Amino acid sequence: MSTPVDPFIACRPGVLRHAWDEVPYDGKAPAFGHVMLNRCMRCGCERRCLVSRVTGEIITRWSYKHPEGYLRAKDATDAAPTSAEYRRMYLAVLLEKEKPKRAPKVHEATATKGKGLRLA
Ligand SMILES: [Zn+2]
């Protein structure tokens, strides 16, 4: 029995990380600054922060809204995988995709059907 593949493996630390795209912010306009909103094109994770229009400095910290199932349940015995472990998992997915597909079995009778016999 194999371990299920992490559907977010490409976005994990040490792998590709999130593929951010800009998203128009349609929430309440801030009194000052500009809300930067981004969404991952792979997993749908969203992040946002408030940026100064004058200096470009980040005024608030990035806040994240992760897709369901992205965050791992944490307890004292369940340490998060390291970046190398995530890369190894990702590599396993890549190798599985690259694995040559098994040639379909061809029944002998089917293989010769239609070729007929040649009479000299
Ligand atoms: Zn992502």
Image: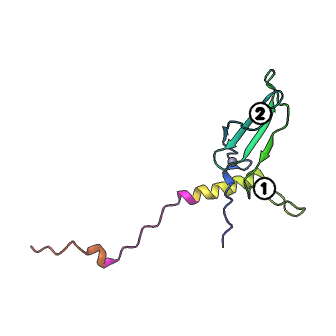
Q: Is mark 2 on a helix, strand or loop?
A: strand
Is 32 on the left or on the right of 96, as rendered?
right
Q: Nearer the viewer, residue 90 or 35?
A: 35
Q: Is residue 33 above or below residue 67?
A: above
Residue 4 rendering spot, x and y as whole percentages: 67, 65
Residue 88 rendering spot, x and y as whole percentages: 69, 55
User: Is the residue marked by circle 2 packed among few (<14), some (14-19), or many (20+) residues within 10 Å?
Assistant: many
Q: In which quarter of the image is the N terminus?
A: bottom right
Region rendered in magenta: 96-108
Q: What element carries label 1?
A: loop
Picture residue at 81% right of the left edge, 56% below the top: 80
Picture residue at 78% right of the left edge, 36% below the top: 28
Question: Which residue of the protein is positioned furthest toward the bottom in this rendering?
Answer: 109
Q: In which quarter of the image is the C terminus?
A: bottom left
Residue type, label 2: Val
Q: Which quadrant of the view contains residue 118?
A: bottom left
Residue 19 rendering spot, x and y as whole percentages: 66, 42
Q: Is residue 117 above or below residue 42?
A: below
Residue position marked by numbered label 1 in the rendering: 71
Residue position marked by numbered label 2 in the rendering: 35
Q: Which of 17 and 105 is in front in this view?
A: 17
Mark 2 / mark 1, whichever is N-terminal: 2
Is 16 on the left or on the right of 73, as rendered?
left
Q: Is residue 56 magenta?
A: no
Q: Give the overall secondary structure of the magenta segment.
A: loop
- 3D distance between C-alphas at marks 2 and 1: 24 Å
Q: Which mark is residue 25?
A: none
Residue type, label 1: Leu
